[in-house]
Amino acid sequence: AAACRTALGDDVEVSVTTGSPLEPAATSTTSQLAQVMDGAQLVARQGPCILAFEEAVVVWTSTVAEDPRWEGLHAHLPAEIHGVVAVPLGLGEAPVGVLNVYRRNAAMPAAVRESAALLGATIGAILTELGVRTELRALAEQMEQALASRAVIDQAKGIIMGDKGWDADRAFAHLVSLSSANGVKVRDLAQALVEQLGDHGASS
């Protein structure tokens, strides 16, 4: 938010919201005035940032207090704010947040609107990349857990095969049958069997 304000000029205030403006996951603002503007739209449940998020389009107004699109918002607005531009953040059709630029005591110049749109695209790309990284990290953790489970189950199968003289398929079917009968996961049963063998080995 601070970097955007530096790029756009001292006569604007900025907020960056992730998630829906109606149920924000996180919000960063450059001033209390920007917080008031975000809060006004949340209370009225209408305004440029909400429309930008819901329609996935850049929304702007020269004088928000006179814009007929948000009559329910007018009573909640601070008098200082005139021009507003709201830019959806994210790549594709589903925004992940909104960049809001509020101009004090004047309409929003076209140059500021264009710069805000460029900044929004950049922030959106960063947030999307972070989201992809988070998904990949979660997938990697799931794969590690799956591999660990597979290793424990294979160990338990080997124990049963050695004890019973069965093949791998019959040993696994026996594990599944035991887990069902005892109401526990196959992995947990296998882990208990491996640990039990380890305890016996240590005591012997």
Image (cartoon, rainbow, N blue to C red):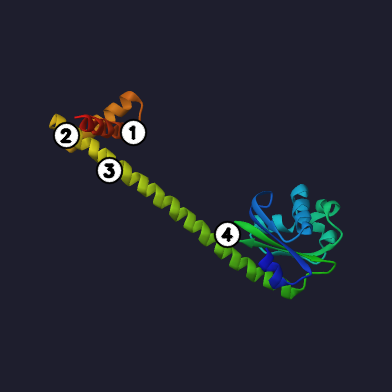
Question: Do callouts 4 and 3 mark residues in contact (Cβ within 8 Å)?
Answer: no
Q: Are circles 4 and 1 on residues that touch, CB within 8 Å?
A: no
* Coordinates of residue 191 in the picture (x, y in percent): 30, 35
**Mark nearer the N terminus (2 vs 4):** 4
For this orientation, the residue located farthest to the left is 165
Question: Label 3, label 2: how many angstroms apart (C-alpha)?
Answer: 15 Å
Mark 1, other Cα within 10 Å: few <14 / some 14–19 / many ≥20: some
Depth order, front residue of 46/19: 19
Among numbered discs 3 and 2, the one appearing first in the sequence: 3
- Badge 4 marks a residue whose secondary structure is loop
Label 2 Cα crowd, 10 Å radius (few <14 / some 14-19 / many 20+): some
Of the numbered discs in the image, which one, if any, rests on residue 93?
A: 4
* In this picture, residue 184 sits left or right of residue 153: right
Query: Which residue is at the front of the view, 60 or 27?
Result: 27
* CB within 8 Å, label 3 to label 1: no
Q: Quadrant of the N terminus?
A: bottom right
Question: Does dot 3 land on a helix, a strand or a loop?
Answer: helix
Q: Amino acid at mark 4?
A: Glu
**Are circles 3 and 2 on residues that touch, CB within 8 Å?**
no
Q: Residues within 10 Å of mark 4 (few under 14, many from 20)?
A: few
Disc ID at residue 161: 2
Estimate the x, y position of residue 171 in percent, counting from the top left.
20, 33
Task: Give the image location of residue 203, x and y in percent.
Answer: 22, 29
Instruction: For mark 1, give the secondary structure.
Output: helix
Q: Which residue corresponds to mark 3?
A: 151
Q: Which amino acid, by three-letter code, is at mark 2?
A: Met
Q: CA distance from mark 2 to mark 4?
A: 54 Å
| Residue at (26% x, 34% y) in the render | 194
